[in-house]
Amino acid sequence: MTARLREAMVLEPGDEGYSDAVTTVTGTGTPDVVVRPISTGDVADALLYAKQEGMLVTVRGGGHNLAGLTQARNGLLIDMRRLNAVERVGKTPRVRIGGGATWGRVAKALEPEGLALTAGDTADVGVAGLTLGGGIGWMVREYGLAVDSLVAAELVTAEGKILQLSEDENPELFWAVRGGGGNFGVLTGLEFEAHPVTNVVFGTVMFALDLLTDARALVSGWFAHQKDADRRLTSVLALLPAMQGSPAMGMLQFCFDGDETAAAEHISAFKALGPSMGEDISYRPYASILVTDDPFPAPPAAQQSSLLPDFGVAEQTAACKAFETGEIMMALRALGGAMAAVPAEATAFAARHAQVMVIGTRLLSGESDGDQNIPGWRRIQDCAAGAYVNWLDTADDKASRLSYPQQTRRRLSRIKAEYDPRNVFSRAVQFAE
């Protein structure tokens, strides 16, 4: 172990801080060594040490990867959370963010500047992890994916080489990290073009679903309003089955980047969708809408996503039939707008034409539950153009084929072979042919 690594805070089982470092949303890991870098050089040293010792490498930021890719079973874990600086670049809208920062930290830092970036729904989600998968957030229709605002990045390769990425410098690798996952190295820094955002209208409206037909009417009405709405509006409709004594219900959440007067038309349309069980709508700082009380770790669940290029009768019927099994929670997320304005080949996230992302979640009875299937999901998948890699609970070949079209997989495979031929960064969705 080098002196520099020791200064960067190396933890072994039993050390104070080890338990915190190895605990993620999916559970608690058991790595042999944890390194908590405070500089890019520390990350390079950690990777060189892992190579010397022949150790498996796992990288964690926020630790929210649903497939457990940030939960280390053995080897070396790089806990990036101390590399979390958020700095504005002069008086420009650009902001430099450390590879271990979370979206909550970024939102709070940018709030006094009157700036924001589209982010994950949860404050504790890592900036780097979400961005590596594309980055769908509350302003996806107005400003696109997180990768659409990324203008530069710093990455450490498996060989400990520090590279700067942009459209002009290492452009192929820059293309790959915008949606291709953690296959190519460790992101130690990200530079984004932030957007002028202050307060937003954020709301939740709850609907009773006493009859199964209520779900279909709610889904149809929601999409009819959302599909051609102002780009400043992004909404998510969740269908929740009856459980633990609570009735089935619909929960509509929306974010509108504007004032209450401008949002009034949309609020009225949403309220008219069905019988309301209550609402909570307010005009407040964007930073305050990110969820801060996410349970950690989460209960075991089977979870899948599908990106639907159309959301007509067939797609709506498939989603509702799956919900009607009474076994799954269903979330429908509006896409389009600025996300669709970017060419499919511009980044490794290729499903630009998707109108809706459907997320199905089935809580499992325990970690030993081997039946990971989500009832009714095959019909939804048949309508899909792909899946969102950040919302998959596995990282196998099937996940790869769902997440990346063949042409994208081939290009990603070539870049992977160039920058990580030993597959040091195996804790990622790989690119099956």
Image (tube, helix red, strand yellow):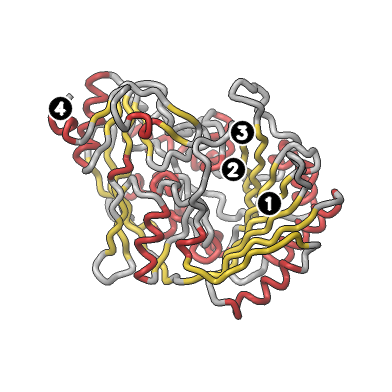
Horizontal side of 282 relative to 153 (left or right) equals right
Q: Which one is nearer the viewer's eye here, 426 or 328?
A: 328
Q: Which of marks 1 and 4 is nearer the N terminus?
A: 4
Q: Earlier in the sequence, mark 2 or mark 3?
A: 3
Question: What amino acid is labelled 1 in the image?
Answer: Ala
Q: Earlier in the sequence, mark 3 or mark 1?
A: 1
Q: Residue at x 71, y 73 (%)?
A: 268
Q: Which residue is drawn at 65% across and 47% down?
A: 358
Question: What amino acid is labelled 4 in the image?
Answer: Thr
Contact (Cβ within 8 Å) of mark 4 with mark 2? no
Answer with the quarter of the image where residue 53 lies: top left
Q: Residues within 10 Å of mark 2 (few under 14, many from 20)?
A: many
As measured in the structure, the alpha-carbon distance from the residue carrying label 3 to the one carrying label 1 is: 16 Å
Give the residue at mark 3.
301
Q: Earlier in the sequence, mark 4 or mark 3?
A: 4
Residue 380: where, in percent of width, then height? 72, 42
Answer with the quarter of the image where residue 374 lies: top right
- Above or below, 131 relative to 108: above
Looking at the image, can residue 433 be seen? no
Give the residue at mark 4.
2
Which of the numbered marks, if any, corresponds to residue 238? 1
As measured in the structure, the alpha-carbon distance from the residue carrying label 1 to the one carrying label 2 is: 18 Å
Q: Residues within 10 Å of mark 4 (few under 14, many from 20)?
A: few
Residue 75: where, in percent of width, then height? 34, 22
Q: Which of marks 1 and 2 is nearer the N terminus?
A: 1
